[in-house]
Amino acid sequence: MAETSVSAGHLTTFDTPAVLADEVASWLLRLALQDDAPFRLCLSGGSTPKTLYERLAQAPFKDAFPWARTTVFFGDERFVPDGDKDNNYTMASAALLAHVPIPKNNVHRIVTEVASPERAAADYEAVLKRFYGAETLDPARPLFDVNLLGLGPDGHTASLIPGQSVLAERSKWVADVSEGRPEARITLTYPLVESSRYIAFLVTGAGKKDMLAHVRSGATDVPASRIVTDAEVHWFTDRAAVGS
């Protein structure tokens, strides 16, 4: 049973976002090479993950990473088409996926070229359930090996946005979020975010300092702080984000 708040996760601080990207890429590589099993990685949007993805697309990671047995998913997506500048898959593809030998069938994007955000969410939930091989999550068998997350200045993570009904969703694996942002979004719900062996928050910049301290204090009043999981949680930050 999930029982640990993410506020208790291990904090590692690096001098700059570039150093963070290099060290987290090395951490991911070590995890992926621990055994010969499939490696299931859930990607996040945002500028900090983009720097990490660009690093993974370079030597030595481009050649050393076990791309053939790596499967990629996405934690959330804006309801804009592939190719749009705000599409998370488009960003991840340009920064990483187009540059490494990962099989096309191993990349599971949230398809937004459908009639509605609700349809996109239902379709992605079906994809995840087929991959998982069950309709119900087993805490002893997490879906993701690593789930990369960000932290917004308002405390959101993925598209778990303050004040939205998605925060109370415990049945659906994926849900649409039609309010709270200029564009509709599709997001993994708490049960899916929590179904991970490792959760890694990537947090950089002075603009995140106050919220990072708030979540790390054990507060439970913002979306990121409400994640309760059996996962091993890491906070990877730069010095600006911790105020040092």
Image (cartoon, rainbow, N blue to C red):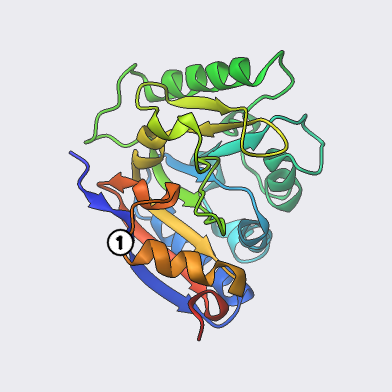
- Badge 1 amino acid: Gly
- Answer with left or right where residue 33 lies relative to residue 24: left
Task: Tell me which residue sits at (71%, 16%) in the image.
Answer: 114
Q: Is residue 137 positioned above or below 68 on the image?
A: above
Nearest to the observer: residue 145 or residue 87: 87
- Answer with left or right where residue 154 lies relative to residue 109: left
Image location of residue 231, percent across then percent down: 30, 49
Classify residue 78 by image quadrant. top right
Q: Is residue 235 positioned above or below 111 on the image?
A: below
Image location of residue 189, percent across then percent down: 44, 33
Image location of residue 185, percent across then percent down: 63, 32
Classify residue 233 by image quadrant. bottom left
Q: Mark 1 points at which residue?
A: 218
Classify residue 192 by image quadrant. top left
Image location of residue 113, percent across then percent down: 74, 20
Nearest to the observer: residue 80 or residue 94: 80
**Mark 1 residue crowding within 10 angstroms, few (<14) / some (14–19) / many (20+):** some
Task: Tell me which residue sits at (68%, 16%) in the image.
Answer: 116
Task: Tell me which residue sits at (51%, 25%) in the image.
Answer: 175
